[in-house]
Image (cartoon, coloured by chain):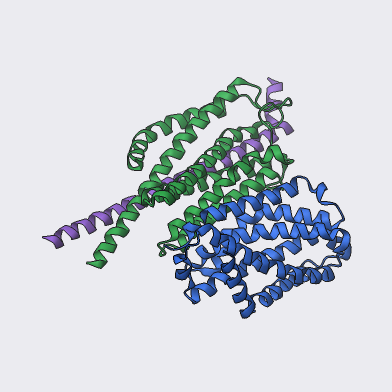
Amino acid sequence: MLALLWKDLVLEARSRETLPALFVLGVLVLVVFDFSLALRPEDAGRFAGGILWVAIVFASVLALGRTFLIERENSCIEGLLTSPLDRGSIFLAKLAVNTILLLAFEALLLPVFALLFDVSLGANLPGLIAVVVAGTIGIAATGTLFALAALGTRAREMVLPLLVLPLQIPLLIAAVQSTQMVLGGSGLATLGMRGDLLIGFDILAVTAGWMLFEFVLVD
Amino acid sequence: MIDILQRWILRLAPPLVLPLGLASLAAIFFWVPTEKTLGLSQRIFYWHVPAATVCYLAFGIAGLSSIAYLRTRRADWDHAAHAAVSVGMMFATITIGTGSIWAHTAWGAWWTGDSRLTTFLILWLIFASYLLLRIFARDNEMAPRYAAVLAIVGTVNIPLVIMATRLFRTIHPQVINNPQGGIDDPRMVYALLVSFAVYLALVLWLWALKLAQLRIAGRLELLEGDRNAA
Amino acid sequence: MNETTAETQVPSAADALAQRQLQHVGWAYSLIFVLLFVFAWRATAATRRLSERVDELERDGQRARR
């Protein structure tokens, strides 16, 4: 499984296309929000968490198909299936790659976000990182499970958001609220139910993906 | 087994639906007393709540059928799941529609950020995307499998919706064990039970109808495939 | 006699409210009926259409085999 992980990472690093695209997309969404909402500085703080996560979710929904697209184009899938690796591990490897990719994207996005909306990231930085990582895992898990399915349909990229966004809404709610609190300086312990929902969602999503991924792969 | 189920339901359900339905409506509009706090508009409750319950039932059946499909790869289970989602979506729409109308008359707003409403809407969206997937992926032979996965993940959300009012703050009327009103007259309970019976008959009947359509469509595809191959 | 005509001529605020609520209830139930009816109708019509087509194809198949 580690070999698979390494292979995908290397592929990504070599192609170097997805991360810049993700970043630019994320920034674009932030900017669109900035202009269309025309928030005054005092109000920006209240909506910052929501805007950040919308940017992350939209950018990731477009990027998550990428890893599979690359494999499809190179007909790697057959090779993957004939390997002795069990399907669940393949999912975990893909999940890891997607998560790392998204985290790299978010690391780049957060400073831009802080700048645009005049938000200080430092109030509880470890807490913020924890929340962002937790949210990202959930997004990556749901996206990875359905990305292959979406690619198989006629409408391709348009279908993944349709499939995945409704499922991600509970995660979004928890992530946005947690981010708001953490940006305001609250500690992780005070997150209460939101934190539980975040972690619960992650566990559910990863488990579901791990169990169901084999059905998404072609025989 | 599905074949037998479909046949029996189509035979037994229709003659039950009409008299039960009439009895229910009569009870709701002529027999049941008016509720204290919400007044006449509360009568929507008798056909709003069973709609939601039956919707959960339908989506639950969809999830179980999807698991069966993934295990056995028999098309009948896939059709059962698809039909269940169709029917469930309709009752979900009924729930949201009647709920909105009730909210508008009782509180003046069509919608609110209430936890039960939000989670139920999520459920609606998930299974809407299921139906969209089936439309978009019609030519793809893997489509039933993707759909099955989606249905299973969606079904996992049902407990979340049901528990939402206990876990989060809500303005949804608490009907059971409410000291300020709610169900305080046994006639309300009976009327509600009759409504549940109506909805149960309805959901089974409509499911069987849709299932019949899907199975014939599947049969047609096979036949046309054979003909094209010949 | 006079009291009753006075009552029937001036609808009280409570009656107006009740009327409006009843209207809403009527809309809600109408919505339910329409949705159920359309669903059942479409399913039955589609099944009829499809089974006619299936019968057609089966007849063709039998003819071809002869």
The answer to whether C34 appears left or right of C16 in the picture is: left
The answer to whether A140 appears left or right of C36 in the picture is: right
Percent of width and height locating residue A122 = 87, 63
Does residue B106 appear anywhere in the picture?
Answer: no
Percent of width and height locating residue A9 = 62, 72
Of residues A136 and A97, the one nearer the viewer is A97
Q: Quadrant of residue A54?
A: bottom right
From the rendered image, report the letter of the chain displayed in purple.
C
Q: Residue at x 61, y 54 (%)?
A: A206
Q: Quadrant of residue B116?
A: top right
Question: How many marks do you count on the picture?
Answer: 0
From the rendered image, report the letter of the chain displayed in blue.
A
From the rendered image, report the letter of the chain displayed in green.
B
Is B36 rendered above or below residue B225? Answer: above
Q: Quadrant of the N terminus of chain B?
A: top left
Q: Residue at x 71, y 22 (%)?
A: C3
